Image (cartoon, grey):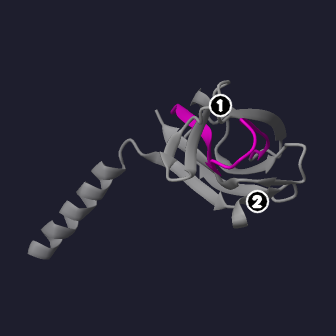
Amino acid sequence: MKKSLLYIAILLTAGLISCGEDVYNERVVLPEAEWAQDNKATFDLTVSDTLSAYAFGIDVRHLETYRYSNLYVFMNTAMPNGNHTRDTIEITLATPEGKWIGKSSGSMRDLRKILMPNMKFPLVGSYHFEIEQAMREPVLKGISDVGLYIEKQ
């Protein structure tokens, strides 16, 4: 009996802790903080809820030695019905004065870029996302990882 109550308490606690957290939050670490143009960060998820609104965005972690104040990426999306989209997204990493934006941890910076604050998935099923750097350099130095997050509103 005591074990059953403990098990139920653990499950309830885990359920309460997960409320308000990201529904999806994955990152791809880029070896040696170098992002080659042909190195796509891929993310797969299954959507079952098309009624709720979600905040949808990209996480970027970069070194303070990164030489640009911004980052351009391509976001490729494959939807369950076979449709594909490709968007170009600019992520501002520093102010015009050169001050880094985002949270600091030593010589690293973390930045969360909201792409859609109240997005609703149009279809139930499997989605595939690819993020690739779209800067002019074939290998971009100073980006250590990139991620995708989806947070229920």
Taking the view exactly as shown, the residue that stands out farthest to the left is 2
Residue at x 73% of width, y 36% of height: 70
Residue at x 90% of width, y 53% of height: 138
Residue at x 76% of width, y 51% of height: 130
Q: Is residue 33 left or right of residue 27?
A: right
Identify the amino acid type marked 2: Glu
Q: Are marks 2 and 1 in contact (CB under 8 Å)?
A: no
Identify the amino acid type marked 1: Gly
Mark 2 or 1, closer to the camera = 1
Residue at x 71% of width, y 53% of height: 142
Mark 1 secondary-structure assignment: loop
Residue 109, can we see it?
yes
Is disc 2 surrounded by few (<14), some (14 to 19) or many (20+) residues within 10 Å? some
Q: Check residue 78 for magenta coloring.
A: yes
To which quarter of the image does residue 85 belong? top right
Residue 1, can we see it?
no
Query: Nearest the camera: 62 or 89?
Result: 62
Q: Which of the image's four quarters has the N terminus? A: bottom left
CA–CA distance between discs 2 and 1? 22 Å
Query: Nearest the camera: 104 or 59?
Result: 104
Residue pointed to by mark 1: 98
Q: Check residue 59 for magenta coloring.
A: yes
Is disc 1 surrounded by few (<14), some (14 to 19) or many (20+) residues within 10 Å? few
Taking the view exactly as shown, the residue that stands out farthest to the top is 96
Mark 2 secondary-structure assignment: strand
Q: Which residues are magenta?
A: 50-79
Q: Which mark is residue 34?
A: 2
Position of residue 71 relative to residue 146, above or below, is above
Position of residue 30 relative to residue 1, above or below, is above
Tag 1 or tag 2, which sits nearer the N-term? 2
